Amino acid sequence: MGPLILTQLATGLSVIAGAAIVKPVMDQNPMVGPFPRCPSCNGSGRISCFCSRWSDGDVGCRTCVGSSGAACPRCGGSD
């Protein structure tokens, strides 16, 4: 293996190790920061669109443009 491959391998392993260390901490403390998250969307800024609740199972309307998610009306999608 050349030095370039070893460098890329070491970088990839360090990214994976860092993610493995950070994930449990983020799972325990999901609300990091001084401001509480929006209770409607849990900080994602998106909620499920009304069109995804239609009985025919079809998803997509002008509001969500087919993504089945609309901006949260409580925080305006900014959380």
Image (cartoon, grey):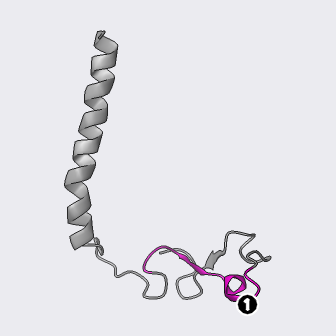
Above or below, 15 against 67 in this view is above
Relative horizontal placement of residue 40, taking residue 48 as reference (left or right): left
Residue 77 in the image, given as x and y percentages of width and height:
56, 76
**Hey, what amino acid is under mark 1?**
Ser
Quarter-wise, where is residue 67 in the image?
bottom right
Relative horizontal placement of residue 44, taking residue 66 as reference (left or right): left
Foreground residue, 16 or 38? 16
Relative horizontal placement of residue 61, taking residue 24 as reference (left or right): right
Q: In the orientation shown, which residue stands out farthest toward the top?
A: 2
* Residue beneath the point at 23% across and 72% down: 29
Residue range (magenta)? 42-57
* Residue beneath the point at 27% across and 50% down: 19
Name the element at disc 1.
loop
Quick one: label 1, few (<14), some, or many (20+) residues within 10 Å?
few
Quarter-wise, where is residue 38 in the image?
bottom left
* Residue beneath the point at 63% across and 75% down: 69
Residue 32 in the image, given as x and y percentages of width and height:
28, 71
Above or below, 61 against 24 in this view is below
Foreground residue, 8 or 33? 8
* Residue beneath the point at 26% across and 65% down: 26
Above or below, 45 against 17 in this view is below
Foreground residue, 46 or 24? 24
Q: Is residue 51 magenta?
A: yes
Foreground residue, 61 or 40? 61
Quarter of the picture holding the N terminus: top left
Q: Is residue 34 magenta?
A: no
Kindly identify which residue carries mark 1: 55
Residue 53 in the image, given as x and y percentages of width and height:
67, 88
